[in-house]
Structures are given as structure tokens and as C-alpha cells.
Image: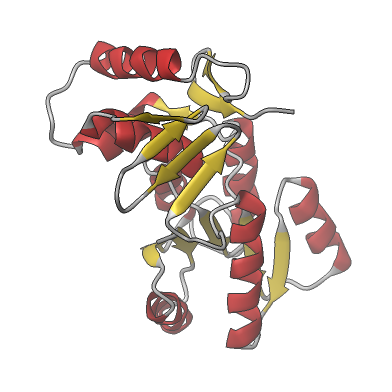
Amino acid sequence: MARILLVEDDELLGKAVEKLLLEENYQVMRATDGETGLDYARQELFDALILDLMIPGIDGFTVLKELRKDKNRMPVLILTARDTVDDRVRGLDFGADDYLVKPFATTELLARVRALLRRLGTEFEDPNLLTAGAILFNKVSRECMIAGEVQVLPPKEAELLELFLLHPKQVLTREQLMNRLWGYEADVLENTLETYISKLRKRLDCEECPTILTVRGLGYRLQMNA
């Protein structure tokens, strides 16, 4: 189930889009201002961002610029009433993947969201199967095959691998990973995460598998095969 971050301050439109996405079985988190939206994106892992430009606090352009500065490759759909060519070009230059002008048809919005998720690789013929190089991972059964060998992964290693497979090429911060694996309230040392990263790297130590790279000062990224 894809997780979508919606940053939209218009109460009626925001609730309508959120309801539409929920009906399509997406998980949705909504923010109504730029600072909160940026904080959510930095603290949590999402598969796509639907971003209004004209929002309170820092505007959508700034949110997008900051995310790309963080090496966050999450697909972004700009949803806005600003329909000038300059605005569209600016949004795309800042790193947006698509641009939808208000008012819009709900069917078109959903089609564009599906297109974003296909680019990320979170929609497959089998939605439960995640693949990367020589890795096959089933999200439901938790079964994992690496380079043709069945691997029995402890729960936290399985969760960690799933997060990397769901967000290929994206830098995942230590905070994001720790929040997803242990929750906000858990008292877990950062070197605990590093221990699990090290164990997972050893499992993926083969030419056919992607590599977990350390991005200094930010976190980790799954380096896909060329």
C-alpha cells in the first residue's frame, strides 16, 4: 500500500483529495502548511508527494527545493491554481515530476498518481513482490530470495530491506529509518540501526545485488545496478 503525503491548505479540497486517495487504498498523511509538510517528509517515508504551491509559511517551491537539497527523490506532483508557463517551468526545474492545475478531474489526478508510483517502482504486476537485482522479497509472506538462495531474515532486517526496496535510489535518513522500525517513542541507540545495516550489507554482498551506500551527514541509499 503506497503512502502519500498531501500538502494542501484548502480545507474542502484537502479533505476531498484525501478521501479520494483513501478510497483507492492509499495511506495518506496531510499537512496544511509548508513547514509541517517539510517536517513530515523528513521524518517519514512516503512514496509520493502531492504539493500545493500557495500554502502558508514556506511556499511549495521552497518545500520542493529543500527536499531535493536533502537528496529526497520522492516523486512530486504539484497541484496548484498557478497555471502560468513560468510557474510550471520553475516547479519542474526545482525537481517536480508532474504538474496538475486546479480545477482538475479526479480521474486525471488518480492517473497521474499511478504514473508517479510506476516511475518509483512501487506498482508491480504482483503488488506484494519487490525486486532489485538478484533480490526478490514478498511483503506479505516476508519470504526473501537473494542471488537464488532463500534467506530467513529476522523481522527488523526484513523491515529494513523492504524500506530500501520501496524507496530505491532515495536517501533515507537515520531518523526516518528509526521512526519506521522502532517508532517515535522507542529508546533505541543509533548504533543499533548501524548494526542492522551492517548485517543487511553482508547478505547483499554479491555482484548481482544492489549496495547500501552511506551518504555522509544524511543517511543511507540503495545503489541500484546499472
Colouring scheme applied when the structure was drawn? secondary structure
Residue at 62% x, 47% y: name it.
64
**Picture quarter with the N terminus:** bottom left
Q: Quarter of the image holding residue 79?
A: bottom right
The one of 49 and 13 positioned closer to us in this rendering: 49
Horizontally, residue 43 falls left or right of residue 87, namely left
Q: Quarter of the image holding residue 49?
A: bottom right
Q: Quarter of the image holding residue 52?
A: bottom right
As drawn, 98 above or below 205: below
Horizontally, residue 66 falls left or right of residue 85, namely left
Horizontally, residue 61 falls left or right of residue 178, namely right
As drawn, 55 above or below 169: below
Residue at 45% x, 45% y: name it.
41
Residue 32, position as x, y percentages in the image: 42, 63
Residue at 71% x, 55% y: name it.
97
Residue at 29% x, 50% y: name it.
141
Which residue lies most toward the right here?
85
Residue 39, position as x, y percentages in the image: 40, 43
The one of 49 and 191 positioned closer to us in this rendering: 191
The one of 72 and 162 positioned closer to us in this rendering: 162
**Picture quarter with the C terminus:** top right
Residue 223, position as x, y percentages in the image: 61, 25
Residue 45, position as x, y percentages in the image: 42, 44
